[in-house]
Amino acid sequence: MRSVVVVAGVLLLTLTGVAAAASRVDQIARGRYLVHHVAMCVQCHTPRDATGTLDPTRLLKGAPNPVRSPVPTQPWAVSAPAIAGLPGFSDEDEITLLTTGRRPGNPVPKPPMPPFRLTREDAEAVVAYLRSLP
């Protein structure tokens, strides 16, 4: 009888782990979709080759800003930082940026970075995807 209880316990822990892993995979897939097709982060944060095509070998590794300010007097970001792996950023800082459009302490990123207002769930998915990248 004891062995049946042990086997049942191991099975329960295994199934719980599998469900958590599947949930994490789904979250990362959602984040990838948002980064590539909704927020379009790849357009500014991925370097381009000589033909202007995004370089998939340097996905989200930071790049010179491909867009110039229409108003020359406005502060404008000259480059987009590397966001693959989120170097130098905490998860909570990035979630704050993606849900409020501001960094902790209230600074607003320079244009052309849009002031996103994602749901917390979507922001967490974006962070999970970016953290999954090398």
Image (cartoon, rainbow, N blue to C red):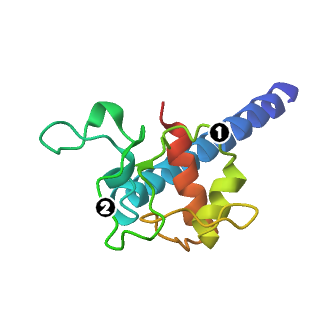
Which of 75/50 is in front? 75
* Residue at screen point 59% across, 37% down: 87
How would you rate the neighbour count of disc 2 (Cα within 10 Å): few for under 14, some for 14-19, many for 20 or more?
A: few
Q: Which residue is mark 1?
A: 88
Whole-percent x and y of residue 45? 39, 48
Which of 14/111 is in front? 111
Q: Is 46 drawn above or below residue 65 in the view shown?
A: above
The quarter of the image holding the N terminus is top right
Q: Is 22 drawn above or below residue 95 in the view shown?
A: above
Element under label 2?
loop
Q: Which residue is mark 2?
A: 68
Whole-percent x and y of residue 44? 36, 52
* Residue at screen point 31% across, 40% down: 47
Which of 82/12 is in front? 82
* Residue at screen point 67% across, 49% down: 91
Element under label 1?
loop
How would you rate the neighbour count of disc 1 (Cα within 10 Å): few for under 14, some for 14-19, many for 20 or more?
A: few
Whole-percent x and y of residue 5? 83, 34
Residue 94 position by quadrant? bottom right
